[in-house]
Amino acid sequence: MSDCGNVQKVFVPTKETPTIQKPISGVEITDVAAEKIRSFVEQKKQSISEFGLKIGVRKDGCSGLSYAMDISSISECEEAGDKLFSKNGCTAMVEKSSYLFVIGSQLDYTEALTGSGFQIVNPNTKRSCACGSSFAV
């Protein structure tokens, strides 16, 4: 072995420090969507701690897939192995079989002259139909 004496290691930062991206997992719920979930659950005279919005993906539409949403029991979704996401005390559940289609998505609620409803902003979508009711991944 050679004797390197008093050699010190020096790390020189490059001009561009790479940023470490946190992996996107789950479904983000906007504040507006959380309030609409609360509103719809309360309209059905159900408890927000026991019911939430269930999201599923179905084979349908001209692009191949579409979303299905309904108010459902949180405990039944837990028993089925569905994924649960919460915001401001409101819960959105994604069917276990649909989760890979929506991972990293954002659940929002939009209101417009042409209609209003929950909207899923899905980074996995490769194409969608002209009317916006179906998509492909």
Image (tube, grey):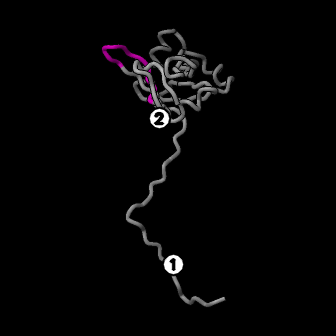
Q: Main secondary structure of the magenta part?
A: strand
Tell me what residue is drawn at x 53 percent, y 24 percent: 92
Looking at numbered disc 2 in the image, what kind of residue is underneath it?
Pro
Please tell me which residue lies in front, 57 or 45.
57
Q: What is the x, y in percent for residue 46?
A: 54, 12
- To which residue does mark 2 refer? 123
133 sits to left or right of 95: left
Farthest residue toward the front? Answer: 62
Please tell me which residue lies in front, 66 or 15.
66
Helix, strand or loop at disc 1? loop
Tell me what residue is drawn at x 44 percent, y 57 percent: 18
Residue 28 located within the stretch drawn in magenta: no
Tell me what residue is drawn at x 49 percent, y 25 percent: 135
Q: What is the x, y in percent for residue 6?
A: 54, 87
- To which residue does mark 1 refer? 9
58 sits to left or right of 129: right
